[in-house]
Image (spheres, rainbow, N blue to C red):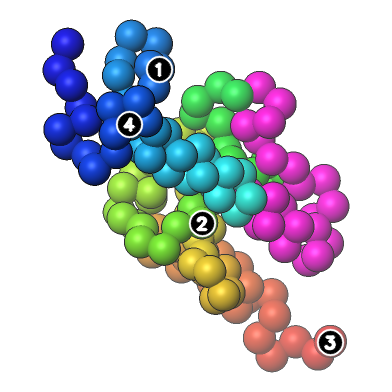
Amino acid sequence: MHNISILTDLPSDRHIYVGSIFVSESWWIVSVNSRAKGCRGERMFRDLCRKHGYTEVRRGQQYCGASGDADVIGLPCIHVEVKFVEKLNLRNAMDQSIRDKREGEIPIVAHKISRKPWLITMLADDWFTLYKFWNENKVGKKQ
């Protein structure tokens, strides 16, 4: 087994075993904090959806934990991938949403960074479909 302590500035007693892998304690803390931030982002986006009237929205992973499920469920025909990170590879996140979506769902990535509002990223074809529907039903019609 390789001693990972030569790769870090932590003393060797600050390493832990994860299964059969010898891991730096600092890496483990970052991983746990990253997962916690992701869960917090899912709850924040769920709350945003509820604020906008989608009261049945809930986190997907908390109930079944199966990969391939949307991070947030309850928006009909939308597959939501939530990312709450400071640096995001948007193409990879969108690819994940496309890969995990079910037939008939529109894949989106809901993403934010600290102290900034939520953004939604979607495929251009899907955006034009939604815009066309909105335009035909909203523009020029009296409220």
* Disc 4 + disc 2, Cβ < 8 Å: no
Question: Which quarter of the rendering shows the C terminus?
Answer: bottom right
Helix, strand or loop at label 1? It is strand
Helix, strand or loop at label 3? It is loop
CA separation in Å, label 3 and label 4:
60 Å
**Which residue position holds label 2?**
84
Q: How many discs appear? A: 4
**Could you tell me residue 25's position as x and y percent?**
39, 33
CA separation in Å, label 4 and label 2:
24 Å
**Which residue position holds label 4?**
24
> For the residue marked with disc 4, what is the amino acid?
Ser
Judged by its main secondary structure, the magenta piece is: helix
* Disc 3 + disc 2, Cβ < 8 Å: no
> For the residue marked with disc 3, what is the amino acid?
Gln
- Say if the magenta span includes residue 6: no
- The residue drawn where x is 17% and y is 11% is 1
Helix, strand or loop at label 2? It is strand
> For the residue marked with disc 1, what is the amino acid?
Val
- Please give the label number shown on residue 143: 3
The span picked out in magenta is 42-64
For the residue pair 29 and 138, the one nearer the viewer reads as 29
For the residue pair 76 and 18, the one nearer the viewer reads as 18
* Disc 1 + disc 4, Cβ < 8 Å: no
Q: For the residues carrying marks 3 and 2, which lies nearer the camera in this image?
A: 2
* Disc 3 + disc 4, Cβ < 8 Å: no
**Could you tell me residue 26's position as x and y percent?**
38, 40
Could one spot residue 90 in this view of the protein? yes
**Which residue position holds label 1?**
18
Helix, strand or loop at label 4? It is strand
